Image: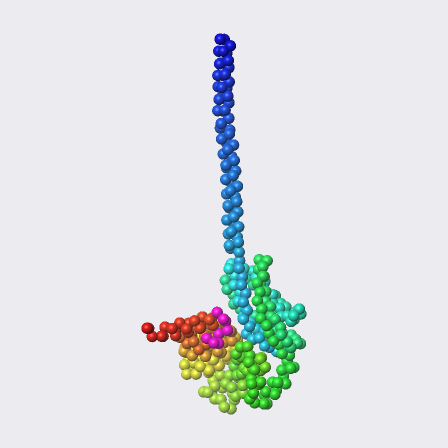
Amino acid sequence: MIVSHLSRAGAWYGTSANNHSFGSLTPVVGMEVRKKYLLAGSIIFFVILMGVLSWFFFAKQVEVTLMLQPMTTTLLAGQTVVFEKVVTASRQKTPVEVTYEIVAGANKIVEKQEKLLISGMSKSQSRILLPNDVQSGDYVVKVAAVFDGREVHDQFKITVNAAEELLPSVKQQSSVPETTAELAPVCAQPCTVVGPCLSAKCVRGACVSEPITSCCGNGKCESVETPTSCATDCGELAASKETVVETAKSVVKRDVGQAVLLCNSLIEDEAVDSCIEQVSRETTTSGVCDGMRSPERRDSCYMQFALNGDFSGCDKIVDRYQSNSCSYLEQAKAFQAQPAV
C-alpha cells in the first residue's frame, strides 16, 4: 500500500515536472519559429525588391536610333558628301560617340569621329570631304552611334567620278546642245542652287553649279540693269540687316525673286535664311523658300506653307518625316474638299 502511494506520488511529481519544463520551453520555441518566419519573409522581400529594381533598370535602359538621308549619292573626287543625320535617344543627355567612315570593300577611305549629347531627337547635317585622289567607283558611307556599350548604325551608297574623267564631258556639253538622252543624266535628287546668280544642273549624275551672266545679284551693275530693276547691284543697299529685311518684306509683295536677292546680299547663311524666313510671312508663294540655304529651315518653310494650304513645296522637302507629313496634309485637305454623300 505504501509502495503504491509512493508510486502514484512519483508519477504525479514526474508529470508535474514534465509539464513545468514544457511550459518553460514554449516561449523559446515560439521565438525560434518567429525568427524563421521573419528570416523567410526578409528573403522573399529582398528577392521581390531585386526583381523590381532589375525590371526598373531594364525598362529604363536607354534606346538610341540612327537614320541617314543623303543629299546626293553621285559626286566628284574632292567634293563633300552631305547628308542629314537624325539621332534619337529615350533618355535625356545621352552621351553618344558617332563614327563616320567611307569604305570600298575592305579599304577604308575616310574616317572621323565626334561626340554628341543627345536629348530626344537631334537632326543635323553632316559633311565628309572626299580626297582629291579618290578613284572612281562605288563606295559605302557608314555611320555608327555607340552608347552604353551598344551600337546602332546606318549606311548608304555613293558613286564617285574622278574629276579628270568628268571634265572632258563637261567641255563637250558646253559646246554641243543637249539633244540626246545620254547628255541629260538623272541625279539622285533635284540639283539645288547654292547661291545667287548660280545655276544648277545634272552632269553625268552629279550636280554642277555654273555662274549666270547678266544676273541681278552678282554684285556687278551690268549694262542691262538699273537701280530700279536691280537695287541689289545698282542701288544703294543699307548697311543694317534690319533695313535689308524690311526692304525685302516690302519688295516681296510685287517681286519674290527680287526679295530673295536682297536677302542674299546679307552673305552669311544664317542671316540669309533668317531674312527669307521673315519675308515668307509676307507672301503666299512657297517658292520664296527655295532661296534658303539650310535644308532644315527650307523644309520648315515649306511645311509652314503646307499648314496654310499651299502644298506646292511638298515634293521639295528633303526630310522624309516632314515630306510624309506634308503629303498627309494634302491628302486630308483633298478628302475634306470632297462633297458629302
Residue 256 placement (x, y as % from top left):
44, 81
Where does the C terminus fall, quadrant-wise? bottom left
Please, is residue 7 above or below residue 72 in the view?
A: above
Please tell me which residue is depicted at 51% across the width and 54% down the height of the picture: 59
Q: Residue furthest bottom?
A: 223
Relative image position of residue 111 (x, y in whole percent): 63, 68
Magenta-span inclusion, residue 256: no
Res 112 quadrant in image: bottom right
Please provide percent x and percent y for residue 207. 56, 80
For the question of whether residue 275 can be seen, the reply is no
Residue at position x 58%, y 79% from top?
206
Place of residue 218 in the rendered image (x, y in percent of width and height, measured from the top left): 53, 84
**Which residue range is magenta in the image?**
314-321
Which of the two residues, 252 or 239, is positioned nearer the viewer here?
252
Front-lying residue, 103 or 250: 103
Q: Residue at x 48, y 78 (%)?
A: 290
